[in-house]
Amino acid sequence: MKIHEYQAKAILAQYKVPVPRGQVAYTVEEAEAAAKALGGSVVVKAQIHAGGRGKGGGVKVGKDAAEAVELAKKILGMTLVTHQTGPEGRLVQRLLIEETLPIERELYLGIVLDRVQGKPVFMASAAGGMDIEEVAANTPELILKETLEYPGLSPYQARKLAFGIGIPPASINAAAAAMTALSKAYWATDASLAEINPFILTKDGKVFALDAKITFDDNALYRHKDLVELRDLNEEDPLEVEASRHGLNYIKLDGTVGCMVNGAGLAMATMDIIKFAGGSPANFLDVGGGANAEQVKNAFQILLSDKSVKAVLINIFGGILRCDTLATGVVAAARDLNIQVPIVVRMEGTNVEAGRQILLDSGFNFTVGADMWDAAQKVVKLAA
């Protein structure tokens, strides 16, 4: 689950990470009040779940409250397009009005899970204020790393990183404390990503999180009811939101072949084989091993809400989700939803013969694939 910059900064502030003074604004009037309260020059920052906001015109500096108001009028309600939003962009519905600071240097701090080690890794770089992916690709030697053990970054690791990215001696303690606090916030919130970019050193030797991003592990949200309330459904695809309400794992893609699969690995393989057959998947949809007929129907409803879907491939390996249960759900969905697009089914596993018989007796013209490759070829042909 992603959250906005101002929400991430509020969480970091709770763990004593220094952040600039700022207020969220949903209207131009609120933006004006915030700018006046802060006094002097302020930064008007669009709040969307995407990076590259500055390059897209979503981050501007106003020298006073009057100029901040004019900037707020332009940014609030605009469709902001960045390299992470895609060409469709995102509608800006809230702003962060924040004090400006005298920046001396821009640095980078971040924590992610290293899946090879199975442990979080704290990264620090002197090359802040730019995409860390670009730094990793072009100058990987500029990224310093320390593996984390519970409960977080050790003081000696923090000082080592601070010296390594060129923090001056007078600011080492403040920088090390901010790094340690960031790691505490990461552990405490079950985050999958905690990033400060840029982490700045000011001309008077202070450090601040000038921008912040936190992403939480969905599987741990049951432990953090307060964090769930930070979710902004306006920033998510409506079909993905609907899928989450029914316990379905759904990600919208830009193809024409709708996919309904049980199991993430099988879903990935299904998308690959559709591409190999010359088609393009319209989604990733994993109904899970414990799906029932009602969930299958809900999955169909979500699939068919995507107008770009020209044909559907159902690829099920019957284990916990038996093939006859799946077939019953498919037939019920076809009746209730008046499905018009072609449907190709490939089933193997528990009660596969019973499942195939249910499809044959349904009266609907389902196409049955002999195996994955046969099913992929058939669905791509029907979607053309």
Image: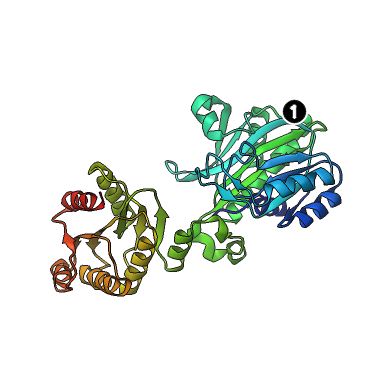
Q: Position of residue 60 (x, y in %)?
A: 72, 40
Where is residue 306, by image quadrant?
bottom left
Where is residue 368, by image quadrant?
bottom left
Answer whether residue 40 is visible to the viewer in this image: yes
Q: Position of residue 365 (x, y in %)?
A: 17, 66
Considering depth in this image, is 153 or 2 the residue closer to the camera?
A: 2
Answer whether residue 18 is visible to the viewer in this image: no
Q: Position of residue 100 (x, y in %)?
A: 79, 40
Q: Position of residue 376 (x, y in %)?
A: 21, 50
When the figure is inspected, residue 66 is found, relative to residue 345, above or below; the finding is above
Residue at image location 44% in from the left, 60% down from the top = 239
How is the rendered protein coloured? rainbow
Residue at image location 28% in from the left, 48% down from the top = 269
When the figure is inspected, residue 190 is found, relative to residue 113, above or below; the finding is below
Q: Secondary structure at mark 1?
A: loop
Q: Is residue 256 left or right of residue 12?
A: left
Q: Is residue 31 left or right of residue 84?
A: right
Circle 1 Cα neighbour tier, 10 Å, few/some/many (<14 / 14–19 / ≥20): few
Considering depth in this image, is 383 or 293 the residue closer to the camera?
A: 383
* Number of numbered discs visible in the structure rendering: 1
**Which residue, given by chain and number where applicable, does mark 1 sit on?**
168
Residue at image location 52% in from the left, 42% down from the top = 84
Q: Is residue 252 left or right of residue 45?
A: left
What's under tag 1, amino acid-wise? Pro
